[in-house]
Amino acid sequence: MDKLLLWVFLLTSLTETLTQTDLRGKVFVFPRESSTNHVNIIKELDNPLQSFTLCLRAYSDITRGYSLFSYNAKNRENELLLYKGKPGEYSLYIGNSKAAFKVNEEFPAPVHICTSWESSSGIAELWVNGKPLVKKGLRQGYSVDAHPKIVLGQEQDSYGGGFDKSQSFVGEIGDVYMWDSVLSPEDILLTYQGSAFNPNVLDWQALNYEMKGYVIIKPLVWL
């Protein structure tokens, strides 16, 4: 009987921390600065990415730099990183190379961000609240490696770890979607309006994730 109760406890604990669910209308809340609080997004990718589009919503009132989305591969730091250095400045890293984007934005205010990249041209794009910023060139001919560790709330300096408190995210993140193609401007606008469709890499409506430390799921109230 004791062994049965132990298995039930372990199964319950695992279900609470590692689950796949529809998170529409919800956000991950990262309530305070730390070097530990984060969310692991569990996604097995067997093939490198030749292109992608990543979209998410975020709300934060901190002015220092922080990671919005960190994707590392084995022995490849900043394989795909979306980083906000300060209000009005975003950076996309591919293969540890950086493209910086400038935008006039209210602060603090909720933001919807989409970023895309394709290997063939090296063109990187960033859209903020449905509006495109100036295109940049980044890592033409490169492939984003497979078998990633994907983290929200922290910036990885190693494969799945190496977190720095000074780069941690404090605020709310939701509506994380990712495709293995570059979406059209019309589709990005639809995603901004809340109509994300057929996301074949990451789907907020069926997300496999693991919360670590002080991270809470709450309703999205700032749209």
Image (cartoon, rainbow, N blue to C red):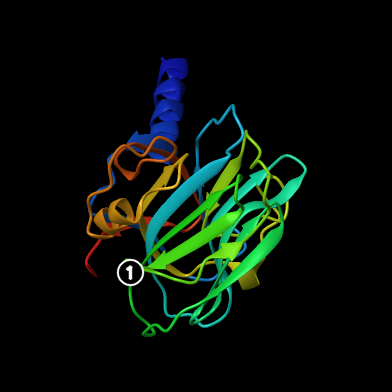
Residue 220 image point, x, y percent: 25, 61
The reply, left or right, for residue 155 in relation to residue 57 is right
Residue 194 point in image, percent of width and height? 23, 55
From the image, which quarter does the C terminus lie in?
bottom left
Q: Is residue 35 left or right of residue 127?
A: right
Residue linked to disc 1: 129
Query: Could one spot residue 31 in this view of the protein?
Result: no
Residue at position x 70%, y 45% in the image: 159
Res 165 quadrant in image: bottom right
Q: Is residue 215 placed above or below 9 in the rendered structure?
A: below
Amino acid on which the number 1 mark rests in the picture: Asn
Assign the N terminus to one quadrant of the image: top left
x%, y% of residue 193?
Answer: 22, 59
In the image, residue 119 lies at what x, y percent?
A: 61, 45
Residue drawn where x is 46% and y is 24% of the image: 6
Task: Please tell me whether residue 174 is drawn above or below residue 129 in the rendered image.
Answer: above
Residue 146, placed above or below residue 82? above
* Residue 81 can be seen, yes or no: yes
Residue 138 vs residue 53, the one in the foreground: 138
The answer to whether 11 appears left or right of 156 in the picture is left
Q: Under tag 1, what secondary structure?
A: loop
- Residue nearer the viewer, 87 or 133: 133
| Position above or below: 178 against 155 | above
